Image (cartoon, grey):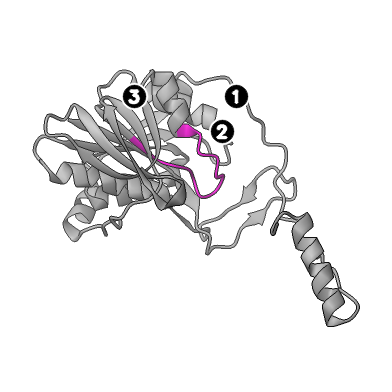
């Protein structure tokens, strides 16, 4: 059984983010902090949990689309226990819309055979959550989103998928493989890389493919400008006696639909 996990390098929220004067890209240098997208880390963990059921018969591959530095997140996933890594390499500062990423991944996947493809539900930087569903559409595979737990059937032809729904309830679905699942979170915390796997990951060769050599969709999004959130302060001072203030507050909350 072959499992592919699509992962992404994102800016570390603890780092300093600086926008270029042109407003078209971010200024980065060797001190800029990056990390593996948290939701993708959960996806890697779910794949490795499935692999733990039969290490000899199940293989986990990770792939990322990004500039040369994105190799770091592949090495981390390999350090967690993934078997192979693929890097669809782009140029620095190249805007990656979900359409471009999904089509590049689809081109990477088509010549191969994967029983299950996992992605994070969304990336921490753009919060779009489109790559997984778009990838499933391009590959004509069924897709389940927002999964929190996966259980592989003994025959490995179906996957039991759990996801949270409104009211604190859980929904249980059966996915006929092959298919695509996006991972929201998990009750299983992502494992730490082990020394053995880290040493192997440092030396392991990665399959590197320039994105220009893959068939991708025509861009459907353009990046016009990046800007910092505008600072704004708004408030209303209530005047009058305590009873009058309470009446005004009640009317405001009612108008906003917060109370009946």
Residue farthest bottom in this picture: 241
Q: Residue at x 25, y 52 (%)?
A: 80
Q: Secondary structure at mark 1?
A: loop
Quick check: 137 left or right of 195?
right
Residue farthest right in this picture: 240
| Number of numbered labels in the structure image | 3
Quick check: 158 left or right of 255?
left
Q: Residues within 10 Å of mark 3 (few under 14, many from 20)?
A: some
Q: Earlier in the sequence, mark 3 or mark 1?
A: 3
Q: Residue at x 33, y 52 (%)?
A: 186
- The residue tagged 2 is 97
Quick check: 22 left or right of 114?
right
Q: Earlier in the sequence, mark 1 or mark 2?
A: 2
- The residue tagged 3 is 109
Q: Residues within 10 Å of mark 1 (few under 14, many from 20)?
A: few
Q: Is residue 227 magenta?
A: no
Q: Secondary structure at mark 2?
A: loop
* Distance in Å between CA atoms under marks 1 and 2: 7 Å
Is residue 158 visible in this depiction of the protein?
A: yes
Q: Residues within 10 Å of mark 2 (few under 14, many from 20)?
A: some
The segment highlighted magenta reads: 118-131
Determine contact: label 2, label 3, CB under 8 Å.
Answer: no
Residue 60 image point, x, y percent: 23, 38
- The residue tagged 1 is 219
Which one is in front, 153 or 193? 153
Which one is in front, 243 or 237? 243
Q: Secondary structure at mark 3?
A: helix
Determine contact: label 1, label 2, CB under 8 Å.
Answer: yes
Which one is in front, 109 or 165? 165
Which image quadrant is residue 133 in? top left
The C terminus, quarter of image: bottom right
**Where 168 falls versus 225 (above or below)?**
below
């Amino acid at each position: 059984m072959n499992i592919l996990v699509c992962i992404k390098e994102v800016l570390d929220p603890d780092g300093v983010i600086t926008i270029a004067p042109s407003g078209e890209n971010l200024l980065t240098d060797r001190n800029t902090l990056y990390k593996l997208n948290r939701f993708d880390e959960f996806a890697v963990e779910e794949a490795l949990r499935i692999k733990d059921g039969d290490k000899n018969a199940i293989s986990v591959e990770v792939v990322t689309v990004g500039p040369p530095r994105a190799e770091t997140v592949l090495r981390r996933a390999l350090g967690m226990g993934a078997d192979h890594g693929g890097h669809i390499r782009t140029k620095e500062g190249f805007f990656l819309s979900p359409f471009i990423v999904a089509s590049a991944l689809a081109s990477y996947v088509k010549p191969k055979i994967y029983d299950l493809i996992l992605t994070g539900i969304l990336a921490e930087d753009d919060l779009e959550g489109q790559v997984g569903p778009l990838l499933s559409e391009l590959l004509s595979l069924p897709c389940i989103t927002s999964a929190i737990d996966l259980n592989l059937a003994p025959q490995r032809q179906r996957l039991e998928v759990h996801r949270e729904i409104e009211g604190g309830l859980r929904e249980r679905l059966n996915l006929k493989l092959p298919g695509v699942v996006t991972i929201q979170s998990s009750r299983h915390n992502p494992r730490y890389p082990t020394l053995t796997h880290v040493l192997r990951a440092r030396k392991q060769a990665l399959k590197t493919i320039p994105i220009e050599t893959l068939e991708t969709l025509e861009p459907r999004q353009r990046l016009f400008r990046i800007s910092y959130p505008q600072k704004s302060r708004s408030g209303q001072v209530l005047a009058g006696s305590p009873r009058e203030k309470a009446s005004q507050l009640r009317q405001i909350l009612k108008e906003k639909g917060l109370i009946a």
